[in-house]
Image (spheres, rainbow, N blue to C red):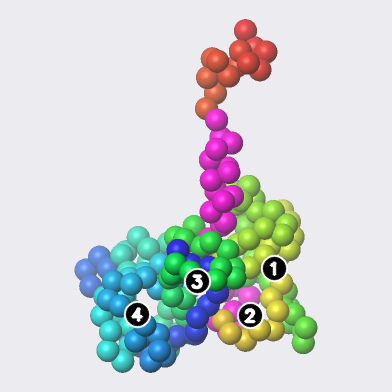
């Protein structure tokens, strides 16, 4: 599990295709390399991956399905990436609970920056709206953010200067893709409310 608080910005050093998977080599701080054991989980742009090797970089294997479903497939050499270490017992939870299992990609349709904040509008599909409520939580490229407003075809978040400075969102432009992970609590709540229609249920509702 993660909290959506980015540890640092890394940089892609190499992308190696290996059959049905891809190996990413990511440049990052010596501290992160030292603190990461082989097999440990790191979120890259919100995608939970396991470190398979390390030297002066960290190496991650990405299966084909994950590569296709996320914006990792759009990475190039020198692309910046958000990195977050997995949550440890006793760590502060400053964001919200993030699984690292990205639901899909969505596009940035509006980006407006001022000295005080950045307004980010992100496209949504009709199926997304049930997971989004104003003041609810969402992870965008692995960053824990608060949904400000939900409109018909997009939702809006506001970024404070600190978030913009310390994440890869500062490099984003209109029409760029971001990874989206909806709040896991919202997904469980939606599943619990989706009761199957049975004869007993119909009788309880007054049908005969």
| Residue receiving disc 2 | 163
Q: Are marks 3 and 1 in contact (CB under 8 Å)?
A: no
**Mark 2 burial class by Cα count in 10 Å: few <14, some 14-19, many 20+:** some
Residue 68 found in image quarter: bottom left
Q: Are marks 2 and 4 in contact (CB under 8 Å)?
A: no
Residue 172 counted in the magenta span: yes
Q: Report the side of 153 relative to 66 (left or right).
A: right
Mark toward the start of the polypeptide (1 vs 2): 1
Cα distance between the residues tagged 2 and 4: 24 Å
Residue 1 image position (x, y, % from top left)? 45, 63
Cα distance between the residues tagged 3 and 4: 16 Å
What SS does tag 4 mark?
loop
Mark toward the start of the polypeptide (3 vs 4): 4
Q: Is residue 25 visible?
A: no
- Which disc, if any, is residue 91? 3
- Mark whose residue sits in front, 2 or 3: 3
- Mark whose residue sits in front, 1 or 2: 2
| Residue receiving disc 4 | 36
Mark toward the start of the polypeptide (2 vs 3): 3
Q: Residue at x 23, y 73 (%)?
A: 18
């Amino acid at each position: 599990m993660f909290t959506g608080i980015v540890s640092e910005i890394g940089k892609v050093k190499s992308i190696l295709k290996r059959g049905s998977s891809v190996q990413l080599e990511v440049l990052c701080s010596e501290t992160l390399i030292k603190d990461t054991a082989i097999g440990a989980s790191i979120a890259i742009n919100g995608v939970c991956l396991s470190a398979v090797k390390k030297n002066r970089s960290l190496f991650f294997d990405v299966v084909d399905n994950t590569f296709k479903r996320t914006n990792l497939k759009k990475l190039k050499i020198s692309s910046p990436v958000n990195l977050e270490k997995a949550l440890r017992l006793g760590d502060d939870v400053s964001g919200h609970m993030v699984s690292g299992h990205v639901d899909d990609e969505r596009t940035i349709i509006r980006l407006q920056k001022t000295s005080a904040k950045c307004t980010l509008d992100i496209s949504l599909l009709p199926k997304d709206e049930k997971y989004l409520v104003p003041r609810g939580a969402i992870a965008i490229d692995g960053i824990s953010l608060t949904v400000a407003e939900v409109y018909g075809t997009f939702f809006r978040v506001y970024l404070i200067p600190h978030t913009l400075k310390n994440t890869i969102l500062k490099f984003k432009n209109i029409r760029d893709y971001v990874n989206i992970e909806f709040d896991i609590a919202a997904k469980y709540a939606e599943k619990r409310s989706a009761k199957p229609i049975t004869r007993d249920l119909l009788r309880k509702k007054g049908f005969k």
